[in-house]
Amino acid sequence: MSSLELRVGEFLAALGAKTPAPASGAAAALTGAIAAGLAELAARFSDDDAAVADARALRARLAALADEDAEAYTAFMRTRSDEDRSRTIDAPLAIAEAAGAVATLAAGLAERGNPNVAGDAEAAAELGRAVARVGARLVEINLRGAGDPRLERARAAARS
């Protein structure tokens, strides 16, 4: 069942279960989707249609990445293949990059958007930055010290 199809309590219980997934990647991705939702709210109250569209797209991407990350890790635990290991790097990299984009978008909305929703935009920016850092760390862990250009991309996203 997709992470989005679970009730919040069910997802939280699944996170705490003794199973390989969902775990930190899926949790980070859904947190990033929540951040994008807050950015979307701030954009709507700021009458910024372009930012609304960007936030909505990022929200959908991050929600999908929750399942992609869980599927990648589950597959790798089953196969231990190089292909599936690579997926355990690609998914958190995509999470970091999308969350970094949320942080940047939300920070702009906090500065220039409707001041009545500045707190929502600031929360979205903080959550986005945190998720980008988590994604970058997961990339680093899953690379196990291997030199790989994806690590620098993840670290750049975390600096958003």
Image (spheres, grey):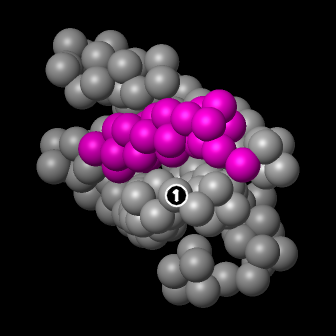
Q: Residue at x 60, y 86 (%)?
A: 5
Percent x, y for residue 112? Answer: 62, 37
The amino acid type found where label 1 is placed reads Asp
Q: Nearer the viewer, residue 144 or 93?
A: 93
**How many other residues sit within 10 Å of disc 1, few (<14), some (14-19) or many (≥20)?**
some
Q: Is residue 94 magenta?
A: yes
Work out whether residue 28 can be spotted: no
Pick whichever, 9 or 41, lies toward us: 41
Relative to residue 79, is residue 63 drawn left or right? right
Q: Seen in the image, is 44 located left or right of residue 72?
A: right
- Residue 27's place in the image compared with 119, above or below, is below
Answer whether residue 53 is visible to the viewer in this image.
Answer: yes
Range covered by the magenta-colored residues: 90-114
Residue found at x 79% / y 51% = 117
Secondary element under disc 1, as helix, strand or loop, is: loop
Q: Quadrant of residue 115?
A: top right
Which SS does the magenta portion mostly show?
helix
What residue do we see at 83% from left, 50% from top? 116
Residue 25 screen position, x and y as percent: 53, 48
Left-right relation of 24 to 7: left
